[in-house]
Image (tube, rainbow, N blue to C red):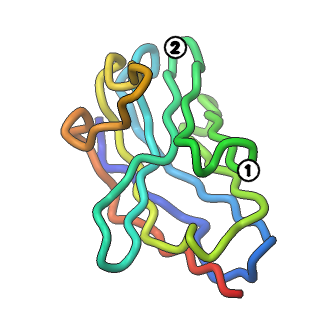
Amino acid sequence: VQAQVESGGGSVQAGGSLRLSCAVSLYTYSDHCIAWFRQAPGKEREGVATINTRHRNTYYTDSVKGRFTISQDIAKNTVALEMNTLKPEDTGMYYCAVGFAWACTILPGTSMTEADFNHWGQGTQVTVST
């Protein structure tokens, strides 16, 4: 696995949309978990969404369900996060991360775990204004 590079961040008004992209170089794309995390100023980093590269199963944290969509393009070696109906509380630094396939197993009542992901990008800033 090589370092991830995020892009697509920016500033947008509430209700707007942004599309983030993560360039991921994997020796094999067959069975990994790729995730998006975010960190707002003064807050802990939180998981946003995951996708399993083999089965393309996805997971979303409750606060973004119905608004965000995670997807992968194997030919381009990218994973995207389409963000619609953005809210000011979506503001933060967004990070792409790669982990083993089991990192995508998130049991009911639990949340994504940073420690399950061992390759991280530098992040891209998303700012949503009122």
Identify residue type, mark 1.
Answer: Arg
**Mark sitting on residue 54:** 2
Give me the residue at 36% from left, 44% from top. 97
Viewer-proximal residue among 121 and 14: 14
In the image, is residue 3 above or below residue 72? Answer: below
Q: Residue at x 52, y 13 (%)?
A: 54
- Residue reaching furthest to the front: 109
| Local secondary structure at mark 2 | loop
Q: Label 1 vs label 2: CA separation? A: 24 Å
- Quarter of the image holding residue 39? bottom left
Q: List x then y, in percent, for residue 26.
A: 38, 31
Marks 1 and 2: CB-CB under 8 Å?
A: no
User: Where does residue 92 sit, x and y in percent of width and height?
Assistant: 46, 72
52 sits to left or right of 84: left
Q: Position of residue 66 (x, y in %)?
A: 74, 43
Judge the density around disc 1: few (<14), some (14-19), many (≥20) Cα neighbours within 10 Å: few
**Residue where numbered disc 1 is placed:** 67
Task: Return the disc, 1 or 2, that comes first in the chain's sequence.
Answer: 2
